[in-house]
């Protein structure tokens, strides 16, 4: 029996706001099978990014449960969640989140070192950077790279460990239309080659339309959109 890569059940997140409780997520239900691509759309402030943070174990819910590849995140402490991310999850940030004083190659090697897989890491990272068209930029630091090049480094970093799950938060949000299109193509190509499950947050309807399933977040609640069926 295939284990779903993501199961979120009755997921909720509430924070304190000037003494009052502010509900960010409420009764979120999500199940994502291995190899699926899922888009989460919605207005700014609707709860999309907080949901990704909970799915990655970067934050803890106020209610409900998140299971990643059969592992209940609530059963893990902070170190355990970090280990799970290192072994199973790649993350693509809108603002790239590269380490400024590391080269492109060093940024991509880092996840392999963190996850205890340093052997062959440089060769693997080099091969992946070449695959995303940055073979001539291996030793450039982020400040010397364009926004599109930085996002390609971020994609290589997310996929270098052959993760079961890739979470992407507005991966084309800071890019012009043409560069964003190229990044979309690269992301879906890498996902297909590695068989990863992909969950992405986006405002871009063209990016969402490339996914198997589309959800909309509104006021902290998640609703699946019906897919159009061709006549």
Image (cartoon, rainbow, N blue to C red):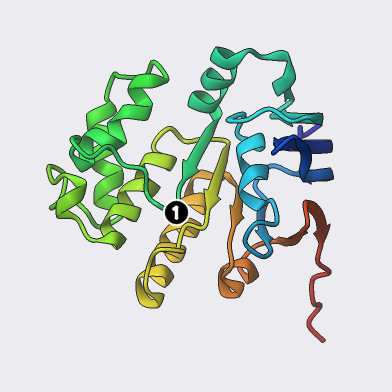
Residue 132 in sight here: yes
Q: Residues within 10 Å of mark 1 (few under 14, many from 20)?
A: some
Residue 185: give x, y in percent of width and height. Answer: 44, 65
Left or right, 225 with reference to 107: right
Left or right, 151 with reference to 15: left
Quarter of the picture containing the C terminus is bottom right
Residue 169: give x, y in percent of width and height. Answer: 53, 51
Left or right, 59 with reference to 155: right
> 51 or 72: which is nearer to us?
51
- The image shows residue 70, relative to residue 199, as above or below, that is above
Left or right, 186 with reference to 13: left
Residue 16: give x, y in percent of width and height. Answer: 72, 34
Q: Residue at (45%, 54%) from the top-left corner?
A: 94
Residue at the bottom extreme, as displayed: 231
Q: Can you identify the residue that label 1 sits on?
A: 94
Q: Residue at (46%, 64%) from the top-left corner?
A: 173
């Amino acid at each position: 029996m295939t284990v779903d890569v993501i199961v979120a059940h009755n997921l909720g997140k509430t924070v304190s706001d000037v003494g009052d409780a502010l509900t960010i997520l409420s009764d979120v239900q999500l199940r994502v099978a291995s190899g699926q691509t899922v888009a989460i759309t919605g207005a700014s402030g609707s709860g999309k990014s907080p949901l990704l943070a909970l799915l990655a174990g970067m934050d803890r819910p106020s209610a409900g449960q998140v299971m990643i590849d059969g592992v209940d995140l609530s059963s893990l402490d902070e170190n355990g969640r970090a280990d799970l991310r290192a072994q199973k999850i790649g993350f693509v940030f809108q603002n790239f989140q590269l380490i400024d004083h590391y080269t492109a190659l060093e940024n991509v090697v880092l996840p392999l070192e963190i996850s205890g897989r340093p052997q062959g890491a440089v060769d693997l990272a080099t091969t992946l950077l070449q695959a995303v068209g940055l073979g001539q930029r291996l030793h450039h630091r982020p400040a010397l790279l364009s926004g599109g090049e930085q996002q390609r480094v971020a994609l290589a970093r997310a996929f270098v460990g052959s993760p079961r799950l890739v979470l992407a938060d507005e991966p084309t949000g800071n890019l012009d239309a043409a560069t964003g299109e190229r990044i979309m193509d690269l992301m879906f190509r890498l996902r297909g080659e590695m068989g990863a499950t992909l969950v992405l947050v986006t405002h871009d309807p063209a990016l969402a339309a490339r996914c198997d399933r589309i959800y909309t977040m509104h006021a902290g609640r998640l609703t699946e959109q019906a897919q159009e069926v061709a006549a």
